[in-house]
Image (cartoon, grey):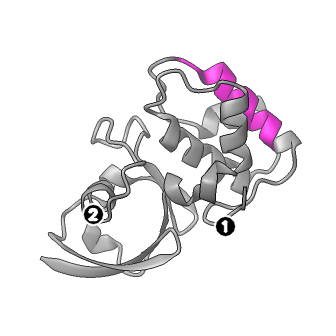
Protein backbone atom coordinates (compact mmCIF):
# COMPACT_ATOMS: atom_id res chain seq x y z
CA UNK A 1 0.00 0.00 0.00
CA UNK A 2 1.13 3.50 -0.86
CA UNK A 3 -0.17 6.80 0.51
CA UNK A 4 -0.23 9.48 -2.20
CA UNK A 5 -1.37 13.08 -1.85
CA UNK A 6 -3.08 14.66 -4.81
CA UNK A 7 -5.54 17.42 -5.52
CA UNK A 8 -8.81 16.41 -7.16
CA UNK A 9 -11.30 19.06 -8.26
CA UNK A 10 -9.59 21.56 -6.00
CA UNK A 11 -9.61 19.42 -2.84
CA UNK A 12 -6.56 17.77 -1.30
CA UNK A 13 -6.77 14.00 -0.82
CA UNK A 14 -4.46 11.38 0.59
CA UNK A 15 -5.13 8.03 -1.04
CA UNK A 16 -3.81 4.87 0.55
CA UNK A 17 -3.93 2.10 -2.05
CA UNK A 18 -1.76 -0.27 -4.03
CA UNK A 19 0.74 1.79 -6.01
CA UNK A 20 -0.34 0.12 -9.26
CA UNK A 21 -4.00 1.17 -8.87
CA UNK A 22 -5.09 3.15 -11.95
CA UNK A 23 -6.26 6.72 -11.37
CA UNK A 24 -9.67 5.71 -12.75
CA UNK A 25 -10.24 3.35 -9.81
CA UNK A 26 -8.75 5.79 -7.31
CA UNK A 27 -11.37 8.31 -8.45
CA UNK A 28 -14.29 5.88 -8.54
CA UNK A 29 -13.56 3.49 -5.67
CA UNK A 30 -11.53 5.56 -3.24
CA UNK A 31 -12.95 9.06 -3.78
CA UNK A 32 -16.51 8.22 -4.90
CA UNK A 33 -16.27 10.28 -8.10
CA UNK A 34 -18.17 8.05 -10.51
CA UNK A 35 -18.60 10.50 -13.39
CA UNK A 36 -15.37 9.24 -14.94
CA UNK A 37 -16.32 6.04 -16.76
CA UNK A 38 -14.57 2.74 -17.43
CA UNK A 39 -14.68 1.87 -21.11
CA UNK A 40 -11.87 -0.29 -22.43
CA UNK A 41 -9.15 -0.27 -19.77
CA UNK A 42 -6.38 0.13 -22.36
CA UNK A 43 -6.48 3.88 -23.01
CA UNK A 44 -8.17 3.66 -26.40
CA UNK A 45 -11.78 4.74 -25.94
CA UNK A 46 -11.38 7.89 -23.83
CA UNK A 47 -14.41 7.33 -21.58
CA UNK A 48 -12.05 7.78 -18.61
CA UNK A 49 -10.55 11.11 -19.76
CA UNK A 50 -9.71 13.58 -16.98
CA UNK A 51 -7.32 16.52 -16.81
CA UNK A 52 -3.97 15.91 -15.13
CA UNK A 53 -2.12 19.14 -14.43
CA UNK A 54 -4.29 20.77 -17.10
CA UNK A 55 -3.83 18.14 -19.83
CA UNK A 56 -6.47 15.61 -20.92
CA UNK A 57 -5.29 12.06 -20.13
CA UNK A 58 -6.76 8.57 -20.01
CA UNK A 59 -7.09 7.83 -16.30
CA UNK A 60 -7.16 4.06 -16.80
CA UNK A 61 -3.50 4.20 -17.85
CA UNK A 62 -2.07 6.24 -14.95
CA UNK A 63 -0.88 4.45 -11.84
CA UNK A 64 -1.23 5.92 -8.35
CA UNK A 65 2.53 5.73 -7.80
CA UNK A 66 3.05 8.38 -10.51
CA UNK A 67 0.51 10.87 -9.17
CA UNK A 68 2.10 12.38 -6.06
CA UNK A 69 1.30 16.09 -6.01
CA UNK A 70 -0.81 15.88 -9.17
CA UNK A 71 -3.73 18.18 -9.88
CA UNK A 72 -6.67 16.21 -11.30
CA UNK A 73 -9.95 17.59 -12.65
CA UNK A 74 -12.81 15.20 -13.37
CA UNK A 75 -16.16 15.83 -15.03
CA UNK A 76 -17.50 16.66 -11.56
CA UNK A 77 -14.93 19.45 -11.36
CA UNK A 78 -15.41 20.86 -14.86
CA UNK A 79 -17.93 23.28 -13.35
CA UNK A 80 -20.33 23.33 -10.49
CA UNK A 81 -23.92 22.62 -11.53
CA UNK A 82 -23.01 21.87 -15.17
CA UNK A 83 -22.46 25.49 -16.10
CA UNK A 84 -19.40 25.07 -18.35
CA UNK A 85 -20.18 26.35 -21.86
CA UNK A 86 -19.58 22.87 -23.31
CA UNK A 87 -21.94 21.23 -20.84
CA UNK A 88 -24.64 23.75 -21.66
CA UNK A 89 -24.17 23.29 -25.41
CA UNK A 90 -24.07 19.49 -25.08
CA UNK A 91 -27.57 19.66 -23.61
CA UNK A 92 -28.89 22.42 -25.87
CA UNK A 93 -27.66 20.71 -29.05
CA UNK A 94 -28.67 17.18 -27.98
CA UNK A 95 -25.11 15.93 -28.38
CA UNK A 96 -25.30 12.71 -26.34
CA UNK A 97 -27.26 9.70 -27.42
CA UNK A 98 -26.49 6.92 -24.94
CA UNK A 99 -24.25 9.30 -23.00
CA UNK A 100 -21.67 6.79 -21.80
CA UNK A 101 -18.67 8.44 -23.48
CA UNK A 102 -19.81 11.98 -22.83
CA UNK A 103 -17.94 12.74 -19.60
CA UNK A 104 -14.65 11.80 -21.25
CA UNK A 105 -15.66 13.55 -24.46
CA UNK A 106 -16.45 16.76 -22.57
CA UNK A 107 -13.10 16.62 -20.78
CA UNK A 108 -11.26 16.10 -24.08
CA UNK A 109 -13.21 18.97 -25.68
CA UNK A 110 -12.50 21.30 -22.73
CA UNK A 111 -8.81 20.44 -23.00
CA UNK A 112 -8.84 21.20 -26.72
CA UNK A 113 -10.48 24.60 -26.21
CA UNK A 114 -7.98 25.41 -23.48
CA UNK A 115 -5.11 24.73 -25.92
CA UNK A 116 -6.82 26.15 -29.01
CA UNK A 117 -9.64 28.63 -28.42
CA UNK A 118 -10.70 28.58 -32.08
CA UNK A 119 -10.14 25.10 -33.52
CA UNK A 120 -11.05 24.20 -37.07
CA UNK A 121 -13.04 21.06 -37.88
CA UNK A 122 -9.74 19.37 -38.75
CA UNK A 123 -8.25 20.46 -35.40
CA UNK A 124 -11.23 18.95 -33.60
CA UNK A 125 -11.05 15.71 -35.55
CA UNK A 126 -7.33 15.42 -34.77
CA UNK A 127 -7.67 16.26 -31.07
CA UNK A 128 -10.79 14.30 -30.14
CA UNK A 129 -9.68 10.69 -30.29
CA UNK A 130 -12.37 9.50 -27.89
CA UNK A 131 -14.71 6.85 -29.22
CA UNK A 132 -18.45 7.47 -29.35
CA UNK A 133 -20.14 4.16 -30.03
CA UNK A 134 -23.35 5.99 -31.02
CA UNK A 135 -21.53 8.05 -33.65
CA UNK A 136 -22.56 11.53 -32.53
CA UNK A 137 -19.32 13.01 -33.87
CA UNK A 138 -21.06 15.62 -36.09
CA UNK A 139 -22.96 16.99 -33.06
CA UNK A 140 -19.82 16.85 -30.91
CA UNK A 141 -17.89 18.81 -33.54
CA UNK A 142 -20.72 21.33 -33.94
CA UNK A 143 -20.93 21.92 -30.17
CA UNK A 144 -17.18 22.46 -29.90
CA UNK A 145 -17.24 24.92 -32.81
CA UNK A 146 -20.16 26.77 -31.24
CA UNK A 147 -18.37 26.91 -27.88
CA UNK A 148 -15.35 28.39 -29.64
CA UNK A 149 -17.60 30.97 -31.32
CA UNK A 150 -19.13 31.82 -27.92
CA UNK A 151 -15.73 32.98 -26.70
CA UNK A 152 -13.19 31.50 -24.40
CA UNK A 153 -14.53 28.65 -22.32
CA UNK A 154 -13.77 28.74 -18.61
CA UNK A 155 -10.84 26.54 -17.69
CA UNK A 156 -11.60 23.12 -16.29
CA UNK A 157 -11.55 23.25 -12.56
CA UNK A 158 -12.50 26.92 -12.48
CA UNK A 159 -15.96 26.78 -10.96
CA UNK A 160 -18.53 28.62 -12.97
CA UNK A 161 -21.64 29.51 -11.04
CA UNK A 162 -24.89 28.63 -12.74
Report which residue position mark 2 lands on: 63
Residue 50, compared with residue 68, is above or below; it is above
Task: For mark 2, give the secondary structure.
Answer: loop
Q: Position of residue 157 (x, y in %)?
A: 60, 65
12 left or right of 25?
right
For label 1, the residue is 158
Q: Say few, some or many: other residues with alpha carbon within 10 Å of mark 2 (under 14 / 14 to 19 / 20 or more).
A: some
Q: Is residue 132 left or right of residue 118?
A: left
Cα–Cα gap, marks 2 and 1:
25 Å
2 vs 1, front mark: 1
- 116 lies above or below 96: below
- The answer to whether residue 79 shows anywhere in this view is no
Question: Residue at image x 70%, y 29%?
Answer: 141
Position of residue 151 measured from the top left corner of the image (x, y, whole percent): 87, 50
- Figure check: 55 above or below 10: above
The residue that appears at 30% across and 35% down in the rendered structure is 40
Name the dominant secondary structure of the magenta segment: helix
Q: What element carries label 1?
A: loop
Task: State the extent of the magenta-drawn residues as a range.
Answer: 135-147
Amino acid sequence: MTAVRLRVNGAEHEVDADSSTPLLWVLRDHLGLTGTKYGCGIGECGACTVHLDGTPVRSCMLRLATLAGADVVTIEGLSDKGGHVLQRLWAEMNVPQCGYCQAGMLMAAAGLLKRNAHPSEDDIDAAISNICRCGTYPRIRAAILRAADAGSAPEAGSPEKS
